[in-house]
Image: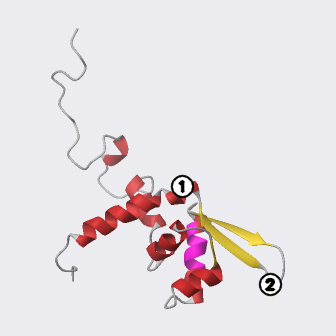
Amino acid sequence: MTHQTVGHRPTTRPGLPNDPRAAVTEPTSSCPVEITLAALRGRWTTLVIRELLQGERTFTELRRVLPALSDKVLSDRLAHLAEAGVVDRRREPGWPPRTRYRLTPHGRRLGPVLQALWDWGATQQEPPL
């Protein structure tokens, strides 16, 4: 009997997972890459995640560190991230009421994804048109 790897040829190409979901001919909502891109969709989303990677924040704290971001867009991004299971929203009792945001364990796993996106982008000479 020979070892499993003897004579074994990889059936995948570099950079492609050995997963049946990778053998599609068009984007599908069950594709892990599409799921990730959907979670990161929208301008400012990656910066909101970046701030939450540093720890729990209130809406006001996020607004302070991202001053060019409008309240409406920040609210929209936080709601989207909560819906995607990336952010946990916790309301504190008291007056004025405060809402704290933090990354879920699933959301924290986006840290290396953002780092990989940064690393890839940093190797580009000029931004694409």
Q: Position of residue 38 (x, y in %)?
A: 45, 65
Residue at 50 percent of width and 70 percent of height: 49
On the image, numbered disc 1 is attached to which residue?
106
Depth check, front residue: 7 or 124: 124
Q: Quadrant of the C terminus?
A: bottom left
Give the overall secondary structure of the magenta segment. Answer: helix
Q: CA distance from mark 1 to mark 2?
A: 30 Å
Amino acid type of the residue tagged 2 in the rendering: Pro
Query: Magenta stretch?
Result: 75-81
Residue located 18% across and 80% down the image: 126
* Label whose residue precedes the other's in the sequence (1 or 2): 2
In the picture provided, is 61 more to the left or to the right than 21? right
User: What kind of residue is marked 1?
Assistant: His
Q: Position of residue 37 (x, y in %)?
A: 41, 64
Q: Residue at x 25, y 72 (%)?
A: 122
Badge 2 crowding class, 10 Å Cα cut-off, few under 14, some 14 to 19, many 20 or more, is few
Label 1 secondary element: helix
- Quadrant of res 43: bottom left
